[in-house]
Image (cartoon, rainbow, N blue to C red):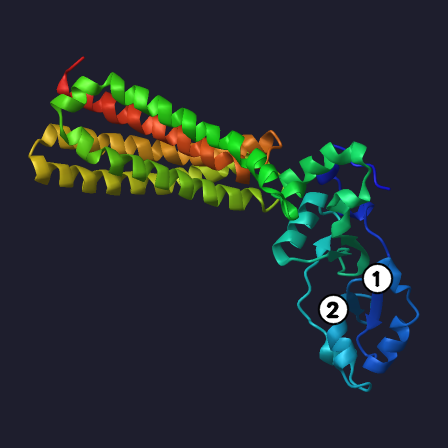
Amino acid sequence: MIAFKTEFLDETVEHYIHQRFVRLREEMTVGEAVRQLQQYDLSKQIMYLYVTDNEERLVGVVPVRRLLGGAADTRIGDVMIKKVVTVPSNATMEQAGAAMLKYKLLAVPVVDSQLRIIGVGTWNLFTEDSLTLSRKPQVDSVFQLLGLHISLSRQASAWIMFRERFPWLLWNIASGILCAIIAGRYEMLIQEIVLLAMFMTVVLALGESVSMQAMTITLQRLSAGPFRWSAAMSSLRRELSAAGFLSAGCAVIIAAAAMVWKGHWTQAAAIGASVGLSILTACILGVLIPSLIRAMRIDPKVAAGPIVLACADICTLLYYFSVMQMVAGTK
């Protein structure tokens, strides 16, 4: 029984590997491999057949179906799959789990610097079946960091799915109410400048779209390995560079459309400026909020979306009305 700790994902995979796997030689025939396979206890869940060369280096993997369907005199090297997903012995458990999730594997071979297979890490290390119920909170945290809840990895009931999703949707409800309050605060401004009501929807949509794009890219990067703030800041710099061009392009187009429509260049410029500010802010939120949630060891795939959208909408409206109020010179 493995004792899970909160630092489990940061430990190296070599501490959890086992030797219950079949090792075949590249020059063996299918008949010889089948006879060797009959010597193993298949009840120990041997999942893959790994092929090595004369220097013990991993060179391929043989699916059981190919082995049983091949002619007895066929070389193993001719039926094996040469492209094998491996993890180095110094990889963390999080990296091993991410590799199995990405390629939908039940096990992954662990190799040393010379590509010699030293053991196998299996998916059951991450399942609650390998633990006592008293350790379930630790397992849940493992699955959250891997982007997968145990309760959702099976056929969860409607009530479980409701409990998982509804608390985060409260952010959308709260932001919607707060946005209505903000709009009410500027009711007189909206009545005075009709252009505000006309472009409110498109300005909100642009902020939400950019925040979702930045968040999606950030989530992909967060799933690639252990979380580090240095990597998050590097991602933020890259996204801000792209957001600068996006904000400029969108601001010019929206401002031009407003100018052509109503002919008020100052109001059009104010709308364009608010679009640029909201896009830049949405980009920052799309990177920092998932990173902060991940740093808190909460599943960012479940929580980040509602929070990012809520914050983006609030910031967008504040920019939208505040900039126009300054331009119009109203209170």
| Residue 261: percent from left, percent from top | 9, 39
Q: Looking at the image, which is closer to me, 231 or 331?
A: 331
| Picture quarter with the N terminus | top right
Q: Residue at x 59, y 47 (%)?
A: 224
Q: Is residue 182 left or right of residue 84?
A: left
| Picture quarter with the C terminus | top left
N-terminal label among 2 and 1: 1
Point out the residue furthest to the top here.
331
Q: Looking at the image, which is closer to me, 262 or 10?
A: 262
Q: Looking at the image, which is closer to me, 108 or 231?
A: 108
Say the numbered circle drawn on residue 21. 1
In terms of image quadrants, where is residue 30? Answer: bottom right
**Number of numbered tags placed on the structure image:** 2
| Residue 329: percent from left, percent from top | 14, 16
Look at the numbered disc 1 and give the secondary structure of its residue: loop
Q: Amino acid at mark 1?
A: Phe
Q: Is residue 293 left or right of residue 64?
A: left
Mark pair 2, 1: CA separation: 11 Å
Look at the numbered disc 2 and give the secondary structure of its residue: strand
Q: Vertical placement of 306 versus 331: above or below?
A: below
Categorize mark 1 by other alpha carbons within 10 Å: few (<14), some (14-19), many (20+).
some
In terms of image quadrants, where is residue 278? Answer: top left
- Tag 2 residue: 61
Q: Is residue 92 visible?
A: no
Q: Amino acid at mark 2?
A: Val
Q: Vertical placement of 180 versus 111: above or below?
A: above
Categorize mark 2 by other alpha carbons within 10 Å: few (<14), some (14-19), many (20+).
many
Q: Residue at x 49, y 38 (%)?
A: 234
Q: Residue at x 82, y 66 (%)?
A: 56
| Residue 68: percent from left, percent from top | 78, 78
